[in-house]
Amino acid sequence: MKTAEEILDFAIQKEQEASNFYNDLANRSELKNIKEVFLGFAKEEQGHKAKLERVKSGKLLLEAEKKIADLQIGDHLVEIELDATIGYQEALIVAMKAEKEAYKLYNSLAEATNNAGLKEILLGLAQEEAKHKLRFEIEYDDMILLEN
């Protein structure tokens, strides 16, 4: 990937995959409130995709946000295998790890481009993913760690 268009197309595809991932987690959940949380994240990822599509068409410029805190809770948890049904704790772990990977991906893409505008967009998306990870970490801390 060398051109801004190729990088944006790749990022658009990744946002669609993330949306599909959260819809899948929602469908695996048996609890209504958990299902709604993941459907909300799927919708946010669709929003990111739409932003990227507007950037690609020249209708929107994105700026990087300030650096988001990282509690690193998900960094030390074991990998979870998805099965037909998934508990809330397991779903949060999977989501934290997915958001960390998305964050790393956008930072890597930003490092790979010499286009200053595109770099700014990608760093902004990295911070969005960091924000999602932080929300999952806070939820995990509040609902799982405090209960134990």
Image: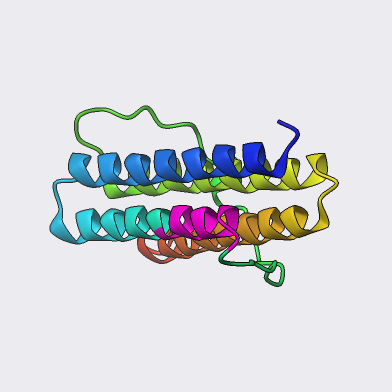
> Is 84 one of the magenta-colored residues?
no
Left or right: 58, with 96 as reference point: right
Q: Quadrant of residue 17?
A: top left
> Is 57 one of the magenta-colored residues?
yes
**Residue 144 visible to an observer of this rendering:** no
**Residue 95 visible to an observer of this rendering:** yes
At a point 57% along the width and 61% down the height, the residue shown is: 128
What is the x, y in percent for residue 45? 42, 54
Q: Main secondary structure of the magenta part?
A: helix
Whether 131 is drawn above or below 56: the answer is below
Q: Quadrant of residue 144?
A: bottom left
Left or right: 20, with 112 as reference point: left
- Tell me the quadrant of the picture where the N terminus can be found: top right
At a point 71% along the width and 67% down the height, the residue shown is: 67
What is the x, y in percent for residue 120? 74, 60
Left or right: 47, with 112 as reference point: left
At a point 48% along the width and 31% down the height, the residue shown is: 79
Instruction: Using the image as rendered, state which of residue 34 and residue 78 is in the foreground.
Output: 34
Instruction: Using the image as rendered, state which of residue 58 and residue 114 is in the foreground.
Output: 58
Task: Name the residue furthest bottom.
Answer: 66
- Tell me the quadrant of the picture where the C terminus can be found: bottom left
What is the x, y in percent for residue 50? 44, 57
Instruction: Using the image as rendered, state which of residue 65 and residue 10 is in the foreground.
Output: 10
Q: Which residue range is magenta in the image? A: 47-58
Task: Name the residue furthest right.
Answer: 114
